[in-house]
Amino acid sequence: MAHEKTEHFLPASGAEMAARGWKYVDVVLVTGDAYVDHPSFGVALIGRLLEANGYRVAVLSQPRHHNPDDFRQFGQPRLFFGITAGNLDSIVANYSGNAKVRDRDDYSPGGNPYFGDQAEKKLRRRPDRATILYSNLARAAYPATPVVLGGLEASLRRFVHYDYQQKRLRGSVLTDAKGDLLIYGMGERAVLEVAARLAKGQDLSGIPGTCERLTEKELEARGISAPLLLPSWAEIQADLPLFLEAELTVDRQARAYAPEPLLQYQQAAWVVQHQPAAPLTTAELDALYSLPFTRKPHPACGDVPACRMIRDSITIVRGCCGNCSFCAISRHQGPKIISRSRDSVVQEAKRLAGQKDFSGTISDLGGPTANLYGTGCTSPQPCKRHDCLYPKVCKFFKIDEQAMLGLLDAVADCAGVKHLFVSSGLRMELLARTPLLLRKLLLHHTPGAMKIAPEHTEDKVLHLMHKPGVTVLEEFLALCQEIGEKAGKNFHFTPYLIASHPGCTLADMEKMAARLGTLGLEVRQFQDFTPTPGTISTAMYVTGLDCEKRMPLPVAKKDSERRAQRQALDIRASGPQVPGYKGKAPSAGGGQKGVCRTRSEKPGEQRQGNKGKYDAKANQGRGKPRR
């Protein structure tokens, strides 16, 4: 491969390292994804940040995992191996919500999840529980080199967690992988501190945003105590409802940015979570996204479908204060909203528009929830809940409609930008409070049908999902219809829905199907609930308990039960056979709709804490719904 084709990327092979005249690297970042140098990919973001701070960084993308040979191609890293499974949890990437093996991986070259044409497990590009296997191989290659775990999989599996492919609880990934350190959440501050300490020959104890694995003696010697001890592995095994208590405690501590350490005893060691790292400031987030990303896959990776989907998108906001029970975005990115400055976003849009292969369309100006841009908290007292939207919008929650309107205008005015879309999630209850923004999005910045994510229509299920009642959906659609009538436009909507969520019964699904018909909404996009690690909904799924009342819940776990709930919506998709269906109502604005199709589930559709469709930092495979 010619050097000139790869010189603008971080070295991804020993030959590329040698072409730079390097005798060594400081850090090797190992990932289960193809190497894509785009800020929506966590390895690219961390790699460029380390590079900007003077470190020599190499990327080991989708290494062969039958022996440690690939881990030796850069020589021994001077500082550490950084291990991540990639933008997705490896089990989510490799298996559907019903634990069926996936035959596609959009984060791999050509979407092929295998090395070659043989569909064998040992030949998967991204192995199951990749964090553990990669850690073991890095340790085998260079036993003396520190192994630091990070990324979504490590972050959400840092305590006792549920693995839906194995249908059992597992201990912390840190103890299973025997890593030296685990960085949780958005890791920019922590990874820089790790690199700085190792460069000075210092230990890695007590770094905010990290977890350590300590023996009883090490814990005593360090003098670490915590006002809150999570139920241990053994206690949870003996009393399953304690798993729900543990998850609720982790959730409360995360939302409060609690400074106290959080401890949980595993099978043979303690996991010690230190206080969270402080969120980046607007200036720091701006600087991060100004780094010299090529926004392309490494030439050795060829076509990577995930990159095609997000190549021309721009992240404008980080964090989410919605705290939906089934979603891990708040836990991974944090509940505080950090918005980039208008100038920073405009400068990125200009760089994007200046690329030779730019199509003229910016596919998304967004984040986990795009219309959280410019929002904030005006409470005179520090808030420990950071739960701003449930059961209703908090009185201290500041909404700045003009900030988003001004940003849209500024980016749309950039030379070379012909079309600007917002495809990320949007909160419907906030859009109802910003009618000028809603009108602008509907008329100018929505690609085709607007994807909305009510998730359900029955209030008892919505309550368990930690989402406001169905009146939000009804009022939103009424407002859109009013805007459409005044503008002489027909607006179409694709609702995103979840079947088999804990507490949801077949009767609830039939009621939802009927209500969707009354509202004139087609059923196009829905999926079974997937019990991914790190969510309150997963804890309810495992324990069968309501997270508030601690009372038993109906939980659809059998294939037949989950299939029946899907079929309730399949019938709705086919027409008026659903009990209570009142015929095909017009869409908001009076437009008529044709026959719809449901879609198959794709990896990562259960919100895991990534940005949007293909971001390391949420919803994959369906566009980015309004919530």
Image (cartoon, rainbow, N blue to C red):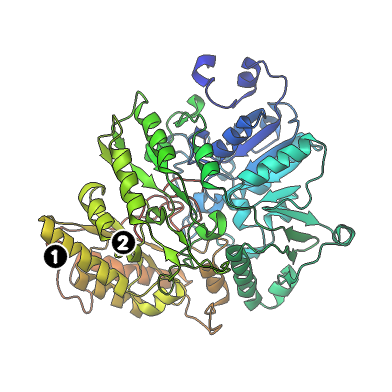
Q: Is residue 235 left or right of residue 105?
A: right
Q: Can residue 429 be seen in this view?
A: yes
Q: Is residue 16 above or below residue 301?
A: above
Find residue 419 and report its image quarter.
top left
Residue placed under numbered mark 2 in the picture: 431
Relative to 12, residue 492 above or below: below
Q: List the single residue furthest toward the left.
A: 488
- In the current view of this chain or complex, which residue is farthest to the front? 380
Residue identified by numbered label 1: 586
Q: Is mark 2 on a helix, strand or loop?
A: helix
Place of residue 619 in the rendered image (x, y in percent of width and height, measured from the top left) = 43, 53
Query: Would residue 506 appear left or right of 194 to someone viewing this image?
Result: left
Is residue 577 in view from this perspective? no
At which x and y percent is residue 51? Answer: 62, 30
Tag 1 secondary structure? loop
* Three-letter amino acid code at the position of disc 1: Pro
Position of 368 relative to 429 (above/below) = above
Q: What residue sits 29% from the left and 78% below the top?
A: 511
Instruction: Name the residue located 55 percent from the left edge and 48 percent from the top edge.
Output: 281
Residue type at numbered disc 2: Leu
In the rendered image, the vertical position of residue 137 relative to residue 225, given as above or below: above
User: Rounded to the nearest whole Å, what is the CA distance between mark 1 and mark 2?
Assistant: 21 Å
Residue 243: give x, y in percent of width and height: 64, 72
Task: Assign the C terminus to one quadrant of the image.
Answer: bottom left
Q: In which quarter of the image is residue 303?
A: top left
